Image (cartoon, rainbow, N blue to C red):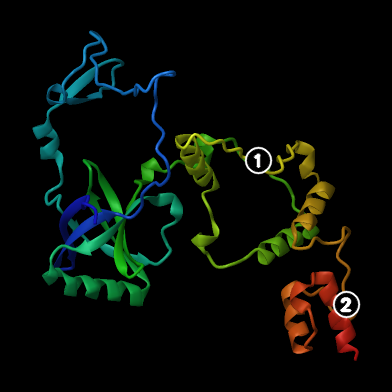
Amino acid sequence: MVNPVWVGTLMFGEVPIGVRLYSARERRGPVLHQFERGTADRIRYVRVNERTGEEVPAEKIVRGARTALEDEYVVLEPEELEALLPHGSRTMRIEGFVSEGSVGPLWYASTYYMAPRDPADARPYRLLHSALDRSRRAGTATVVLRDRESPVLIEPTRGVLAASTLWWPDEVRAPDDVMPPVPYTALGREELALASELVASLSADWDPARYEDSYGRRLTELVRAKAEEETIVHRPGEPERPHRAGDAADGALQEALRRSLPHGRAPGPRQPSRGQGRRTKRELLRRASELEVPGRSKMNREELEEAVARAGGR
């Protein structure tokens, strides 16, 4: 068990629910520190007075903020900051409900699991979880966490409630604020069809177990090998071909899309089959299954098309 990052009350209408928030994520893998080369001496950061260069003890440090004038600051005492906290800073009051999935990933900051604070809170906690799960909605509120007030989204996940802090609207940048505009280019029907087919061929349900932190694994192996005075050699895969502006030309783009499709696709424009449009691999697999074509699961699209045509003419 880990320590909660926040303990307070969640208000569901006039129903109080005592809750605790626990961080839902943590970084894994070796932690890299800094050392002076040739020694075992750690490099550490200390708080120093930039004018005198002397270290300052924690109890003598206060916080401050820059004013509108350059190089002018005001000191903010702890009691002044405490007085600014909203009334009931240990309370989250659900203000409304939004449809599941209506808040895009751009708005999410951090996510915490929410647990009942006491056994008596379990019943209203489960009631809220079930109501949200059945209605496919999420509750909206605000929370003061780590000296910062944030919007928060409360939603069911993995059998419990989760509270996700969100960014404020003025903190989310518009694309035009940080990057040049994307030039407009007209898209051809063939390349759009190829791109759509590629998306369809690679579509699958989200399964995080399919992904691996290969760098973290290799780093762990390197740390272990060096600790045991072994040698480890990492052989990287094929280097990526550098991309050039000309690669996006119409012909090259379409050819790259065809090569990206499972088992490839013969270059050239689509040729419709006799009497019908070109069928997808999924449609051909379904038809091959109906015709009991042997070895169909290992065939590419062209082989399936030929096998289905032969089996259908028997």
Left or right of 192, for residue 203: left
The kind of secondary structure element at disc 2 is: helix
Residue 29, numbered label = none
Q: Quadrant of the N terminus?
A: bottom left
Q: Quadrant of the C terminus?
A: bottom right
Q: Kindly tell me whether residue 94 is visible in this rendering.
A: no
Which corner quadrant of the image does residue 40 belong to? Answer: top left
| Residue at figure coordinates x 15%, y 56% from the top left | 8
Which of the two residues, 241 or 280, is positioned nearer the viewer here? 241
Which corner quadrant of the image does residue 127 belong to? Answer: bottom left
State the separation of the CA atoms marked 2 and 1. 41 Å
- Identify which amino acid the numbered label 1 is placed on: Arg
Which of the two residues, 225 or 111, is positioned nearer the viewer here? 225
Q: Which residue is mark 1?
A: 235
Discs 2, 1 touching: Cβ within 8 Å: no
Task: Say above or below: 29 vs 55.
Answer: below
Task: Say above or below: 60 vs 13.
Answer: above
The kind of secondary structure element at disc 1 is: loop
Density class for disc 1 (Cα within 10 Å; few <14, some 14-19, many ≥20) is: few
Task: Say above or below: 98 vs 108.
Answer: below
Density class for disc 2 (Cα within 10 Å; few <14, some 14-19, many ≥20) is: few
Q: Which residue is mark 2?
A: 306
